[in-house]
């Protein structure tokens, strides 16, 4: 199965701080997604990113969030001024055909 | 509103037994329906994916069914194993191509020895 990797696996931060979550999708893919899952709740779509541009975003993805492709293989999700309610698992996903392959996730804890 | 509802919310079965998980959706227009398995603290892993024209799809001990008319799907697990303990998530894609996914809340399955 194609591998999507994410770093870090865990991130603890203080409220108000900025965090950057990183994802390496399936190689040479231009399309990827970010999702989040608050503990005990369902997975929620945040944003899709295609060829260096945001393709679609949800209501959750407000000005606090941004996505970038700093180099050819890495994608990042930046959360500015984190809030307690940002504590969640954050997954990136990379499609191939009809399938979406999820990374292992980054567990973000905001204190 | 595009929604995916799953039942039961949780389920406990004995090892070796079979079980069936249900999914109802109101997502439209429909492109495909997926079942994912999510172990605690891990990312979802795809089990099956079915398009409008497919009624049944199997993947080992997992068999998914789809009734596009009633907008219902089921996931049947045969001869359950302890490693089947996980959350099983029904996910519906709204339109063709690389469109966003609508997730159900999942059914938490616990297989007991």
Image (cartoon, rainbow, N blue to C red):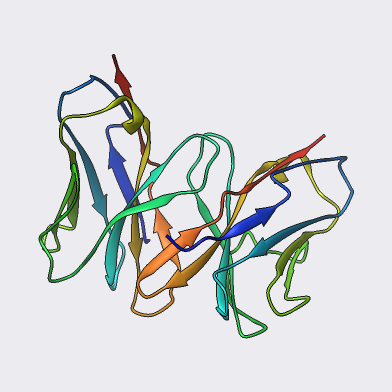
Residue A25 x, y percent position in the rendering: 59, 67
Give the image quarter of residue A100: bottom left
The N terminus of chain A lies in which quarter of the figure?
Answer: bottom left
The residue nearer to you, when weighing B8 against B55, is B55
Residue A48 x, y percent position in the rendering: 57, 72
The residue nearer to you, when weighing B6 against A98, is A98
Q: Left of A108 or right of it: where is B56?
A: left
Q: Left of A53 or right of it: where is B88?
A: left
Q: Which residue does the image show at 68% across and 74% down from the upper left?
A: A73
Q: Classify B6 as above or below A21.
A: above
Q: Left of A64 or right of it: where is B99?
A: left
Q: Classify A89 as above or below A34.
A: above
Q: Which residue does the image show at 51% across and 68% down from the upper left?
A: A94
Q: Which residue does the image show at 28% across and 14% down from the upper left?
A: B113
Give the image quarter of residue B41: top right
The C terminus of chain A lies in which quarter of the figure?
Answer: top right
Residue B107 x, y percent position in the rendering: 34, 36
The residue nearer to you, when weighing B88 against B82, is B82
Hey, which residue is sitting farthest top in the picture?
Answer: B113
Q: Which residue does the image show at 71% across and 64% down from the upper left?
A: A62
């Amino acid at each position: 199965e194609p591998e999507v990797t994410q770093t870090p696996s865990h991130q603890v931060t203080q409220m108000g701080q900025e965090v950057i979550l990183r994802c390496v999708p399936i190689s040479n893919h231009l399309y990827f997604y970010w999702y989040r899952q608050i503990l005990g709740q369902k997975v929620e779509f945040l944003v899709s990113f295609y060829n260096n541009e945001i393709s679609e975003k949800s209501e959750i993805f407000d000005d606090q969030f941004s996505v970038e492709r700093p180099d050819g293989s890495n994608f990042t999700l930046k959360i500015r001024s984190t809030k307690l309610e940002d504590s969640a698992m954050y997954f990136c996903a990379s499609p191939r055909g009809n399938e979406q392959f999820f990374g292992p996730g980054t567990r973000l804890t905001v204190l | 509103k595009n929604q995916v509802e799953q039942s039961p919310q949780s389920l406990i079965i004995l090892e070796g037994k079979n079980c069936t998980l249900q999914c109802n959706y109101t997502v439209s227009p429909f492109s495909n329906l997926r079942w994912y398995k999510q172990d605690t603290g891990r990312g979802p892993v795809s089990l099956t994916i079915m398009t409008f024209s497919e009624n049944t799809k199997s993947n080992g001990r997992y068999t998914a069914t789809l009734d596009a008319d009633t907008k219902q799907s089921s996931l049947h697990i045969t001869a359950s194993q302890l490693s089947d303990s996980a959350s099983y998530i029904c996910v519906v894609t709204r339109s063709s191509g690389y469109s966003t996914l609508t997730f159900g809340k999942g059914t938490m399955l616990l297989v007991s020895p």
